[in-house]
């Protein structure tokens, strides 16, 4: 079986500074892959490279076997991007936003209308189709932001912190939608700072820091390999376990074990 | 590679976004009309009205018959607006008004000016005092010329009288055929034509700037990331932007000139084909200006400030505010290197100077060359600057 996303030895540099170095990973159909890491770890740069916005200094990226350099339009047709910033036209209605982005992916006429109705239903905004996004709540905007990336049924959906700043109900609605997408055969790659979200949603996660992928696998695998503290203990300072009355999420403990506790400024 | 259907869809989206802000759209069309109407109204003077005659304050301190005859002739001159007054009054008026000329005949002027006296050796001719406001140099020269003609005619009359030719009047021994070329009449009578051409062109540049600022905003938002992630070539994306800007610019030209035609009689005296060519080239320039602003921009505040400075300078030097002939010669030479000069020359040419389409095509071609130059430069800058903008700072 062909991986939906295949990255080999990726290296991304801005002048002298390399934001990503020797990154390799594969994401398979019906898989949700969480890309985790502190600020400046290289997550968003990796997503930018996957959508073709940043040319790699070295390495290869393939989506459904297509390369951005050889077949850019075919390559991009496979991808849906949900940026962290709300990427919506506030002056256009929800339906107009969806129609516009559908057209960019080659949908026109009746198939487009039909697909817009399906997506409106999927993101639960059918009753708000003729309203402007500026009248929406944060959660509704996030759902529309997601919907705009789904019109063309992408094989690979990239989500850059898709649940920033929304309430729990909206987050659950988005997660339900993402699980349905996974069930329909798409592969999802998403970045988040909320580790419990990743633990809840992802089949596998990769933890990045300093532009490198430090570890990847299922939460169970990572917990087995890196969570060395017994339940009921937590780290207080570098490598100093102290008793903890609460059992922290496993992924958070692994994350801190791998990336440390020092603050990141960028 | 350009994807025509997607170019159109991108442009349609921008047009829909533009139309969604009704007030903004209304202002976009109303502002050039208001500016053009105001400028036109300020400078409008009927061709034969008093406005074209320099205003002269005449002070005659000499009681000689010659001086009195000169005064009478000056007061009756169809080429000047003359009013008699005292020296102090004339000086005060000159100081308090923003224009004007004072002709002052001092005491003894008539006697000293008699041609039979003046011809004697060692005679010092009298001095005519000609005072003018700093802004009225040309009017002063005009008044001097008309005074000279009248004074010589009247002095000659005195010279010829002893010869028994007192009844003879010396007139100009030739006729003058006056015609403005390109044909279209005097500038003052076409103040609205000039102002509608100038303000339309100036506002097209401002619209280009606004469009560029919108693109700058979009580039910094997630929208640009999403657009760049779609299966569009960069050419398609930028062509969509340029097309929307150009279409709105064309709509501005049509709306502004329609208003001018209905309310101020601004008509196309020259070639209609020439007008269309100039309008298309001006729309291209507006869209290229938009991309250039977005490409050079940096941040929005800086881009706006620099753009306003550049546009106002281009407008002034290009003759969009005042006719280019009022500029000093070095500025006129410099202005040939500006797109606004060719735009103004072409548009004013076809609107009120009776320009043929071939001459208009030359101006449109020059304008299009500037537009294409801007486009190429903007393209190069945007391609160069694109990647870093697309990377968010999250991690």
Image (cartoon, grey):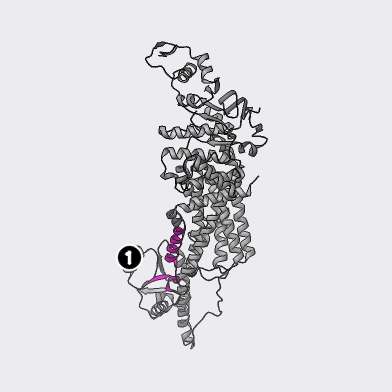
Residue A239: quarter of image: top left
Between B15 and B217, the one nearer to me in the picture: B15
Closest to the observer, A129 or A141: A129
Image quarter where the N terminus of chain B lies is top right
Quarter occupied by residue B78? bottom left
When asked about the image quadrant of residue A234, the answer is top left
Q: Is residue A123 above or below residue B197?
A: above
Residue B53 in magenta stretch: yes
Specify whether A58 is left or right of B54.
Answer: right
Residue B25 image point, x, y percent: 46, 55
State whether residue B124 appears in this view: no
Labels in figure, total: 1
| A170 is within the stretch colored magenta | no
Reply above or below: B36 against B236: below
Residue B375 drawn at (x, y percent): 59, 47
Instruction: Tell me where the magenta segment starts and ends, as one range.
Output: B28-57
Name the one closer to the observer, A205 or B34.
A205
Q: Dot 1, crowdedness within 10 Å: few (<14), some or many (≥20)?
A: few
- The secondary structure making up most of the magenta span is helix
| B333 sits to left or right of A242 | right
Which residue is labeled 1 in the image?
A: B92
Q: Is residue B383 visible?
A: yes
- Image location (x, y in percent) of residue A150: 55, 39
The location of residue B368, given as percent across then percent down, is 61, 54
Q: Disc 1 on helix, strand or loop?
A: helix
Q: Report whether A127 appears left or right of B278.
A: left
What chain does badge 1 belong to?
Answer: B
The correct choice, above or below, for B168 with respect to B148 in the image is below
Q: Is residue B22 above or below residue B174?
A: above
């Amino acid at each position: 079986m062909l991986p939906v996303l295949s990255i080999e030895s990726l290296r991304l540099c801005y002048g002298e500074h390399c934001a990503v170095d020797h990154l390799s990973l594969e994401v398979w159909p019906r898989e949700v892959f969480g890309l985790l890491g502190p600020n400046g770890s290289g997550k968003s740069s990796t997503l930018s490279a996957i959508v073709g916005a940043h040319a790699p200094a070295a390495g290869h990226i393939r989506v459904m076997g297509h390369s951005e350099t050889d077949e850019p339009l075919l390559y991009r047709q496979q991808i849906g991007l949900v940026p962290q910033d709300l990427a919506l036209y506030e002056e256009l209605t929800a339906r107009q936003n969806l129609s516009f982005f559908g057209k960019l992916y080659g949908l026109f006429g009746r198939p487009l209308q039909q697909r817009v109705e399906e997506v409106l239903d999927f993101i639960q905004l059918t009753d708000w189709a003729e309203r402007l996004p500026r009248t929406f709540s944060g959660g509704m905007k996030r759902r529309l932001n997601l919907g705009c990336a789904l019109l063309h049924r992408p094989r690979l959906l990239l989500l850059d912190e898709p649940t920033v700043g929304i309430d729990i109900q909206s987050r659950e609605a988005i997660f339900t939608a993402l699980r349905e997408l996974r069930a329909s055969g798409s592969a999802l790659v998403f970045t988040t700072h909320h580790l419990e979200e990743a633990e809840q949603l992802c089949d596998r996660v990769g933890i990045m820091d300093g532009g490198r992928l430090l570890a990847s696998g299922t939460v169970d695998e990572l917990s087995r390999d890196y969570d060395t503290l017994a339940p009921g203990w937590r780290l207080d300072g570098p490598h100093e376990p102290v008793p903890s009355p609460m059992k922290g999420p496993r992924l958070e403990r692994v994350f801190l074990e791998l990336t440390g506790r020092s603050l990141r400024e960028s | 590679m350009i994807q025509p259907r997607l170019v159109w869809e991108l442009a349609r989206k921008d047009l829909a976004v533009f139309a969604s802000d009704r007030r903004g759209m209304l202002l976009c069309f109303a502002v050039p009309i208001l500016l053009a109407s105001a400028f036109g109204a300020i400078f409008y003077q009927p061709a034969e009205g008093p406005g074209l005659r320099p205003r002269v304050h005449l002070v005659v301190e000499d009681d000689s018959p010659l001086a009195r005859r000169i005064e009478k002739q000056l007061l009756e001159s169809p080429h000047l607006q003359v009013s008699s007054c005292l020296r102090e009054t004339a000086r005060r008026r000159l100081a308090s008004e923003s224009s004007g000329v004072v002709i002052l005949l001092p005491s003894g002027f008539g006697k000293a000016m008699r041609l039979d006296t003046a011809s004697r050796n060692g005679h010092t001719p009298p001095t005519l005092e000609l005072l003018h406001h700093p802004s009225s140099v040309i009017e002063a020269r005009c008044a001097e010329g008309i005074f000279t003609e009248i004074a010589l005619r009247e002095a000659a009359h005195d010279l010829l009288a002893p010869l028994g030719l007192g009844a003879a009047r010396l007139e100009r021994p030739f006729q003058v055929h006056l015609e403005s070329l390109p044909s279209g009449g005097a500038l003052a009578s076409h103040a609205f034509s000039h102002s509608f051409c100038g303000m339309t062109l100036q506002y097209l540049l401002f619209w280009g700037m606004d469009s560029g600022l919108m693109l700058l905003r979009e580039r910094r938002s997630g929208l640009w990331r999403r657009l760049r992630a779609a299966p569009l070539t960069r050419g398609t994306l930028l062509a969509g932007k340029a097309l929307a800007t150009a279409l709105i610019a064309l709509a501005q030209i049509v709306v502004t000139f329609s208003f001018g035609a209905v309310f101020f009689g601004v008509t196309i005296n020259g070639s209609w084909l020439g007008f269309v060519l100039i309008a298309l080239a001006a729309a291209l320039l507006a869209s290229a200006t938009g991309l250039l602003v977005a490409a050079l921009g940096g941040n929005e505040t800086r881009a706006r400030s620099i753009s306003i400075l550049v546009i106002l300078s281009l407008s002034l030097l290009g003759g969009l505010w005042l006719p280019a002939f009022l500029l000093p010669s070095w500025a006129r030479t410099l202005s040939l290197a500006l797109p606004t000069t060719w735009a103004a020359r072409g548009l004013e040419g076809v609107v009120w100077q009776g320009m043929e389409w071939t001459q208009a095509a030359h101006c449109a071609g020059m304008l299009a060359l500037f537009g294409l130059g801007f486009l190429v430069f903007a393209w190069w800058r945007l391609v160069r600057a694109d990647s870093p903008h697309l990377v968010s700072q999250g991690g």
